[in-house]
């Protein structure tokens, strides 16, 4: 099939573009920055596109004439501070609202039959009790009704994207709620873009409080595999793309430090962390809830190369 990958130069594009090509699809990958070499090297046809420019989006979609659009548009940079979460995600939030609307409009104009969009699962889940629930959230549960003030705009943008895509009656709309990426092309990777690994190595990522908040991870290779599967199968709707085991902060941060040969992380009390990372950061570390991947494995026929973060941290970084 002809596939337009919007955001081919993003974190997941590093793994997703060659995976789509290897699956036999004719891939067109968009970038706003002008760095087209990596997209071409991966076997895709590069296209210039600004997701916030309606005419630019329409032009790219008309040129690609895709059967499927994959919306992976984000604008993430190093140095994101949970205390300023909405500010640091401002452009990504616009892409989740305006970019989604532009792509859906263009998709309808050229007769695209299937539309996949990137969302997120983790801090967006409803929280149940201090320390985080041990029961992973599935796709039937609503988004958190009481997000921290620092992340309300970001959650509203995620809600817009999910509702716009899944409510489409004329297009098969699938929303892929990815967990925290790690591996090549992400912040959890070796090299100049590996901000999170650098923080762990420098002991700048402490465990807050008891570290009971749970995070669902997914290796970039596995996230790409799930996305390729969703191009061809799966009913419209929401899918959590995460590994098998949500990880407590008190476990995954020390495990990552050990995998890197770094010193164990520091521990700081909640009262000391709150002024530095805000309520959103404290929630992430103490009360966030993991997600279930049962639906994605069952309905997409998805299998993971790194079924848990424990295996992935040891072998997949």
Image (cartoon, grey):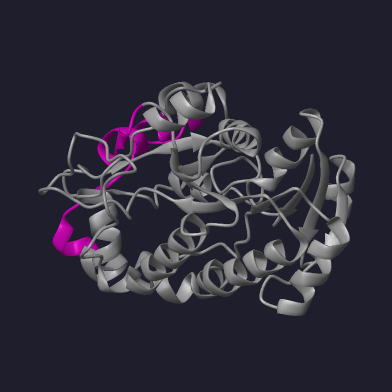
Looking at the picture, tell me which residue is in the foreground, 92 or 28.
28
**Residue for point 24% across, 45% down:** 213
Residue drawn at point x = 46 percent, y = 59 percent: 167
Instruction: Name the foreground residue: 257 vs 147.
Output: 147
Name the residue nearer the viewer: 62 or 228.
62
Tell me, yes or no, whether the highlighted magenta stretch contains residue 118. no
Residue 288 in picture, x, y percent from top left: 25, 49
Viewport quadrant of the N terminus: top right
- Relative image position of residue 224 (x, y in whole percent): 62, 36
Q: Name the residue rendered at 70%, 61% in the picture.
A: 107
Query: Measured from the top left, where is residue 142 in percent x and y?
Result: 27, 54
Q: Residue furthest left?
A: 129
Quarter of the image that includes the C terminus: top right
Along the horizontal axis of the image, is 17 left or right of 162?
Answer: right
Task: Judge whether residue 208 can be spotted in this image.
Answer: no
Magenta stretch, residue numbers: 245-273
Quarter residue 155 falls in: bottom left
């Amino acid at each position: 099939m002809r596939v337009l990958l919007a955001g081919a130069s993003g974190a997941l594009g590093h793994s997703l573009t060659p995976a789509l090509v290897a699956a036999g699809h004719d891939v067109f990958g968009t970038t706003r920055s002008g760095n087209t070499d990596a997209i071409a090297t991966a076997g895709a046809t590069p296209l210039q596109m600004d997701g916030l420019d309606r005419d630019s989006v329409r032009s790219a979609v008309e040129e690609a004439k895709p059967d499927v659009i994959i919306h992976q548009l984000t604008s993430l940079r190093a140095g994101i501070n949970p205390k300023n979460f909405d500010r640091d995600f401002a452009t990504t939030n616009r892409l989740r609202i305006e970019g989604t609307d532009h792509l859906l409009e263009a998709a309808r104009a050229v007769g695209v039959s299937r539309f996949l969009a990137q969302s997120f699962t983790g801090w967006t889940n409803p929280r149940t009790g201090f320390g985080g629930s041990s029961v992973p959230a599935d796709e039937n549960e609503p988004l958190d009704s009481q997000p921290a003030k620092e992340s309300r705009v970001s959650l509203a943008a995620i809600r817009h994207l999910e509702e716009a895509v899944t409510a489409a009656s004329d297009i098969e709309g699938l929303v892929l709620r990815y967990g925290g990426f790690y591996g090549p092309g992400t912040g959890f990777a070796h090299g100049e873009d590996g901000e999170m690994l650098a923080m762990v190595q420098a002991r700048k990522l402490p465990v807050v409080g008891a570290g009971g908040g749970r995070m669902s991870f997914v290796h970039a290779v596995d996230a790409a595999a799930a996305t390729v599967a969703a191009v061809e199968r799966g009913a419209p709707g929401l899918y959590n793309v995460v590994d098998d085991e949500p990880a407590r902060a008190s476990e995954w941060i020390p495990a990552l430090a050990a995998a890197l040969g770094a010193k164990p992380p520091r521990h700081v009390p909640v009262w000391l962390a709150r002024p530095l990372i805000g309520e959103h950061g404290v929630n992430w570390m103490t009360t966030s809830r993991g997600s279930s991947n049962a639906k994605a494995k069952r309905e997409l026929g998805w299998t993971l190369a790194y079924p848990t973060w424990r295996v992935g941290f040891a072998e997949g970084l």
